[in-house]
Amino acid sequence: MSSHRVDYLAIPAWTKGWLTILGGLAAVIAIAGLSVLYMEHQGHWVTGMTNQVVWGMPHVFAIFLIVAASGALNVASIGSVFGREVYQPLGRLSALMAMALLAGGLGVLVLDLGRPDRLIVAMTHFNFKSIFAWNVILYSGFFAVVGFYLWTMIDWRMKKVYKPAAITAFLWRLILTTGTGSIFGFLMARDAYNSAVMAPLFIAMSFAFGLALFILFLMGSSTALARPLSQELLRKKGRLLGLFIAANLYFVAIQHVTALYQADRGPVEAFILLHGGVYTWLFWGAQIALGGIVPLILVLRPQATRCHLRAASVLVVLGGMAQIYVILIGGQAFPLTLFPGMEVSSSFADGQVNAYVPTLAEILLGLGGFALALLLTIIGASAFRILPQSLGDGEEATAEVIDAEGEPLAAQ
Amino acid sequence: MGVRAVLLALLLGLFSAMGGYAWAGETGPSFPKATSTALGGSCVDDPATMRRHHFDFLKHQRDDTLRQGIRGAKYSLKECVSCHAQVKDGHAVPVNAPGQFCASCHEYAAVSVDCFSCHATTPQQPQQQAEAK
Amino acid sequence: MNHDTTRRDLLKAAAVGAVTIAPGLTLIAPAAQARALGQPASATNRWGLLIDTSKCDSGCTACVDACKTEMGLPALDRPATDAQYIRKVDVTDLKTGNQHSLPVMCQHCAHPPCVDVCPTGASMKRADGIVLVDRHICIGCRYCMMACPYKARSFAHEDQTDQKAVNPRGKGCVEGCTLCAHRIDAGGQPACVEACSKDGGAAMLFGDLNDPKSEISQRISKEATSRIRADLGVEPAIRYQGI
């Protein structure tokens, strides 16, 4: 049993279906572009964002995509860093999706800036005490590190640096998600944030969201391209997704139980968990039940079907959006505590729960980020040999790999 | 592959577009001269130097003034505006209006000015202006 | 010789400033001095305020109105997005029924969280402790607004016209109280303080916390004062009595 062979084939471009999908995505991106022009021309007052809720729907989309980006890289890392060969044929797609999702997220984030025309300033002026500045470096570096890693996977002449590149990419993504979580973790001003648990929580979130998007793309592309996809491989991914969902739930529990234990965090926890209106509904209904418990049950069924796995992945994505909405918007909706224990009022909404209603333009911008990520993934997979020709059970090559799972083969 | 060829073509197209220049004609733009005599009728530096370096002077001054609090610097946007804004029907005309001092050159050179999304475009110390006269 | 005219004008303006503030000072009248032209702000100064809430009337908005006029903040009647550099907060202790009112503005922290989080360094602290936004390099990310414990900053949500020369401001940048740095540099005091002594209850005192002989230093050395959310350790330069 010598080395098996995985054949990769680019997505055939310029077919009718390919053009339709790309045209559709380009249209969504164009609409997002028009939304940006509208919001930037008018100024932010036409959005739902205010002086109280300063980050809104675009940031929910952007953070989701950025978090999912690092998570999407995990499939590659599991194959390379942790030597699980069954995942290796998917490493290329994993790396490509990671870069595409990050590009989509950053696109949304940057286009919501008050002065997007000054992006160059963010690249030339660094305040190294700012986690945001570090993230600018971590995000840019991610493209370089993962791009190089993808190169080592595609080009056999780069074989000798494959492992170091894989390890670098894995460590980089862990630090990157730590940085993203710390955007909130370092905010002592707001009761809902300011906790070290934000970093590991965001890492757990990234594992779940990234894998869910990866499964969805894999299932969609295998159907569209009529390439075989093993049920057993999918179930394995489903079980891994279950593990990540559980990890996310665990850190959410830690986040809230820790806060509940601190007397001064009581009010903000009561707001999110009990009487926060839409935030409470989103927390229990969308994030925990639909985005956590239901998909967990679906993927852990021993005879989980494709339909179950697809539904579970969709729910994880929607639950993830709800989770970020609750963290980001819910955390800002709860009033800042200037005078603990006192009732306050002012012309600047002190002491009030801050209203936020997302506008259509903000949502369209966010959806544009998703479309951009998908477009880049499809173009990447059409330009390069990213997707395996077959991930089926019947093919002897792939079957061999699946048999070998559990006791890692010696490196070929 | 076809897609790769298209991507490459797009990339090359981008580079060549960035390299393109529109060459300026022989004659420069005409712009209104300073109206104020606050500085004795001449600018803080000779006009050729100002034309060539005003942005460097102003950028240096803005950082000194805002970040370090240095006041009374030789070059100041406020003074550009107070000397060079035209007066029409008793009202000052914004310096970034078409044909005015800042706009005439910048439109000619196709260089956008970012100053006036924030800075006042008309002089604002009428009593000081009067005293200076 | 060209510069002499400018210099004279500025010094003249500074002298006028010193005269106007004189009536506001009662105990020890410090010589309100304009910093010499060409000199940077210095760490030997630490500008701050002392606000006596017992003299601050709940219905009075003299400081707020003065700020809007001085800084050229228009009222677009959109309370959610209109800029407010200073606001009046009414505080009620529900347990005891005790009520008081006080102005809240940028607290000009010694360890400002807004400066820490700003990715480009646009949010900055001047040598004399005044916290400012350098709008030249502000990209409008609003992270400083997330980080400020006092909600002291606003975002310019729309295009601006008719800005005051002393407060350039435009769409897409974050802004906030400058402690009227332009007045302080000319030897004056903030517009809110001036208005409070003239039209309000004279509840606000401006001065140099680093100068032991200043009125503000004398008073805070003798009388009990506190700071909003002192527990956060950011060391604001705005001190309050009666909160």
Image (cartoon, helix red, strand yellow):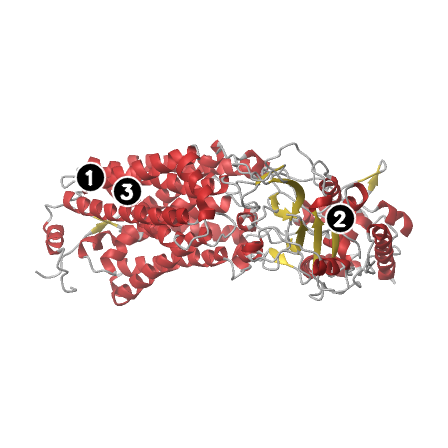
Q: Secondary structure at mark 3?
A: helix
Q: Residues within 10 Å of mark 3 (few under 14, many from 20)?
A: some
Q: Is residue C208 visible?
A: no
Chain designation of label 1: A
Marks 3 and 1 belong to one chain = yes
Give residue A217's mark. 3
Determine the CA span between mark 2 and mark 1. 75 Å
The percent coordinates of residue C94 (x first, y second) are 57, 38
The percent coordinates of residue C160 (x first, y second) are 67, 40
Outermost residue toward the left in this view: A1
Residue indicated by mark 1: A226
Give the residue drawn at x 56%, y 42%.
A342
Disc number lying in front (3 or 2): 2
The percent coordinates of residue C155 (x first, y second) are 60, 43
Marks 2 and 1 belong to one chain = no
Give residue C193's mark. 2
Give the residue drawn at x 27%, y 39%.
A293
The percent coordinates of residue A384 (x first, y second) are 29, 51
Q: Residue C196 versus residue A136: which sits nearer the camera?
A: C196
What's the residue type where badge 2 is placed? Val
Q: Residues within 10 Å of mark 1 (few under 14, many from 20)?
A: few
Q: Secondary structure at mark 1?
A: loop
Residue A171 drawn above or below residue C140 = below
Among numbered discs 3 and 1, the one appearing first in the sequence = 3
